[in-house]
Image (tube, helix red, strand yellow):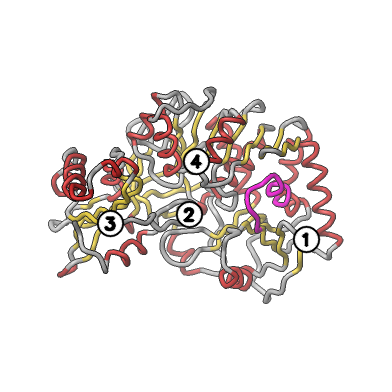
Amino acid sequence: MNLLWNELSDRMRAHRSAVFWREPETMTYAEALRGIDERAGRLARSGFREGERVLLRRENDTAWPLDFLAVLAAGGVVLPVDPHLTEGEMANLREHSGARWSVEPAGPRRIEAPDAPPLPNGTCVMMYSSGTTGMPKAVPLTETNLLANLESLRAKIDIRQEDRMLCLLPFHHAFALTVSVLAPVAAGASLGIAPPLKPRELLAAWGRMEPTFVLAVPALLRLVERLVQRGGTLPSGVRGIVAGGAACPVSTMQALEAAGFPVLQGYGMTEASPVISANAPGESRLGSVGRPLKGVEVRLSASPEGEILVRGANVMPGYYRDPEKTAEVLRDGWLHTGDLGRIDADGYLSICGRSKNLILSDDGKNIYPEEIESALAASPLFAELCVVGRPVADAQERIAAVLVPGEAMAAVPASERPGKVRAEVDRLCAQLAPYKRVQEIFLKSDPLPKTPTMKVRRPEILRWLAGQRPL
């Protein structure tokens, strides 16, 4: 039987009154255990065999954790996938993964799939990373990987039996799966489920559940910030908003802290199960992603800034069916994250940016677009934004800001908007070194293209820019 399931089922039996909640349904752990047993039995009666791979394809609801845990209980390997993938994308996943089963709202069904290479020993979950560049990568995670991350995460943010975790993100993402599903179950805490990425409904769920922890990405925190700025109210008692997936603007964190909602910015990647570091309640340092979790080693490839390298029991064995990519990121026992960072004297890690996103100035200086984005995010004129290096002649790049107007822009007459936008960008960039300041501004009426976990797809932005003229 799966070691992860053994651990989680023991905790569920010890805390039978904790609940999975999504209005109007409330399900205690005792009821959930019966549902898991029934689902695992249905799989077995359908011909499921231990070790087979199962695609879990459904929206966030109280049945999602039951289906996930039922596959573990049956000795299977779970592949959580985005329920909104096209049939073509699903066909590619089936062929690549070798999954022989699909669990959907209608129940389990056997599917045709070609024979596929074996998974690393102990694999119980395989995640397809969303990524913002290229094809998704298949990341096998073992029982040891996930148990190590769970225990160190629980100790870091101090999840207790009486806590209520509200998740605002899709469960098929590694961040949401570990932090808001597995960690609360391991602590005997309750889990609240909101429709992911639907602002009005998630704020209503927040008000009704009165959570002690909220899991969100920065794009959602900006929505909460705007609500607070307009005089809206949310229940107090939040011990921490656990933020990850992308850099959160310091101005947003300051506004939420002032309103009584401490933000615990963390850092991770699917390949690390996923949490690498996090700020702890009462020890948070704005602008950083906290100290590494217990049992996780972090060092930099260079000082004072360099690529972040990670080592620990939480690190994946390697990408499935991609030895070349595995050899690229796992070298000498260290996971090469591709992210650039620095570590202060107290051990707090700060993310400078993604190495692939770096913009090189004309005189060879490194420019982190995330730093510029953080400065621009302080303006209410912009609902969304992205900074990229737009290629120009002679292998040079121009610092380009792509801005989606916010509600505050509606009050500005159309004829005055270009000048207003330029002045606002200049004002916010004045705090940056001259070589970091925006050189071109583009307004975009539609939302920025994003992954399912709200990360901006920069390659798509660059393609869009090819046919646009700056202000």
Q: Residue at x 21, y 40 (%)?
A: 428
Seen at 46% across and 64% down, the residue is 327
Residue 98 horizontal side relative to residue 371, left or right: right
Alpha carbon distance from label 3 to label 4: 24 Å
Q: Which mark is residue 248?
A: none
Which of discs 3 and 1 lies nearer the camera? The answer is 3
Which sits earlier in the primary sequence, circle 3 or circle 4? 4
Q: Which residue is mark 2?
A: 333
The answer to whether mark 1 and mark 2 are in CB contact below 8 A is no
Q: Is residue 285 visible?
A: no
Dot 4 and dot 2 residues touching (CB under 8 Å): no
The local secondary structure at tag 4 comes to strand
Q: How far apart, in angstroms, are the residues tagged by discs 1 and 4? A: 35 Å
Secondary structure under the numbered disc 1 in the rendered image: loop
Residue at position x 50%, y 30% from top? 240
**Residue hosting label 4:** 216
Residue 388's label in the rendered image is 3
For mark 2, give the secondary structure: loop
The part of the chain drawn in magenta is 57-68
Q: Quadrant of residue 120?
A: bottom right
Name the residue type under label 2.
Gly
- Please, what is the three-letter code of the amino acid marked with disc 3? Val
| Image position, residue 152 (x, y; %) | 56, 37
Can you say whether 258 is above or below 6 in the image?
above
Label 1 and label 2: CA atoms lie apart by 31 Å
Give above or below for 445 relative to 288: below
Q: Earlier in the sequence, mark 1 or mark 2?
A: 1
**Mark 3 or mark 1: whose residue is earlier in sequence:** 1
Q: Give the SS element for disc 3.
A: strand
